[in-house]
Amino acid sequence: MFLKGKTALVTGSTSGIGLGYARALAAEGAAVMINGFGDSAEIDGYVADLSKSSGAGAVYCPADMRKPSEIRDMVALCHAELGGPDIVINNAGIQYVAPVDEFPEEKWDAILAIILSSTFHTSAAALPHMKAKAWGRIINTGSMHSLVASPYKAAYNAAKHGVSGLTKTIALEVATQGITANTICPGYVWTPLVEGQIPDTMKARGMTRDQVINDVLLDKQPQKQFVSIEQVAALALFLCREEASAITGSNLSVDGGWTAQ
Ligand code: NAD
């Protein structure tokens, strides 16, 4: 349990990849704050399981990643209840698929806020705690869409490219202070977010469900398989190790070969 004594805050961790990160960190002994939306009984169950698995505390914070003041309060609550945060994983995300000239303004604003601005606010609020201990890990969930684009995902591509630029800036600013910042860039991972974008893509492209899965989602993923949540979480865990302390400012792909093309 190499993360005993550390506290991790994972945004968007009531589902999918975020919950996978939280489970992996807790299994290594970290106290964990989870965040996101969902059924309250289900979330209570996740908190109980995480706490049991880590032997340290686990706390849920319902902060809305569109709201800077709630994000700053979440970091303060984490510090007060669990200490740290020593590890911050910015992971909350949503998707919307439409051509640029039909892209709804409110979807653009929400995607930029949840994916990009929230990463700025959590990082800004957590960095003083990390600097005080001269140790920290900021791990941001980017995407292959941090590196290359796909049509109909204007806000998502822009926000994920932005996350990569922000992460590099943080990495440079704290390079001598024991803190690293990296972007994990997964290819398609089978989660509710991916499942949820299938109907819109069917509509936007006039395709069947199977066509969207095989000809759109996995079209450019050379391994022709979805990445697993556990494969992404394993990379985040590695980034928390001392052996990874020279990895900073990097985009790390876990994409089945997507960006090799
Ligand atoms: P998911 O839908 O399973 O989980 C998203 C999480 O974000 C949930 O916990 C949800 O409650 C939370 N969330 C959404 N809006 C929020 C808000 N306003 N405030 C707080 N929390 C909010 O999705 P996922 O596939 O696990 O995606 C997680 C991250 O991974 C996202 O940033 C996504 O862009 C990225 N990603 C996913 C894939 C993939 O194929 N699934 C690929 C690359 C990157």
Image: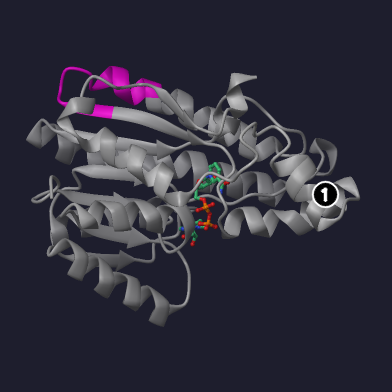
Please name whichever residue, 238 or 139, is drawn nearer the observer in this view of the structure.
238
Q: Is mark 1 within 8 Å of ligand 1?
A: no
The residue at the point 57 percent across, 41 percent down is: 112
For label 1, the residue is 211
Please name whichever residue, 16 or 97, is drawn nearer the observer in this view of the structure.
16
Identify the amino acid type marked 1. Gln
Q: How many numbered markers are drawn?
A: 1
Where is residue 186? Give x, y as percent.
51, 37
The residue at the point 62 percent across, 46 percent down is: 109
Relative vertical location of residue 146 with respect to residue 200 in this rendering, above or below: above
Q: Is residue 11 visible?
A: no
Please name whichever residue, 16 or 75, is drawn nearer the observer in this view of the structure.
16
Left or right of 248: which side holds 205?
Answer: right
The residue at the point 17 percent across, 53 percent down is: 30
The residue at the point 30 percent across, 36 percent down is: 138
Label 1 secondary element: helix
Looking at the rendering, in which quadrant would you find the C terminus? Answer: top right
Where is residue 14? Give x, y as percent.
42, 64
Specify the quadrant of the image occupied by residue 236: top left
Q: Count neighbours of disc 1 (C-alpha within 10 A) and say few if under 14, some if 14 to 19, many if 20 or more.
A: some
Residue 174 in the magenta stretch? The answer is: yes
Q: Is residue 242 visible?
A: yes
Where is residue 177? Give x, y as percent.
15, 23
Where is residue 38? Give x, y as percent.
48, 71
Specify start and end residues of the magenta stretch as a single range. Answer: 168-180
Residue 139 in the magenta stretch? The answer is: no
Relative vertical location of residue 78 with respect to residue 158 in this rendering, above or below: below
Relative vertical location of residue 132 with respect to residue 97 in this rendering, above or below: above
Left or right of 57: which side holds 97?
Answer: right
Please name whichever residue, 68 or 146, is drawn nearer the observer in this view of the structure.
146
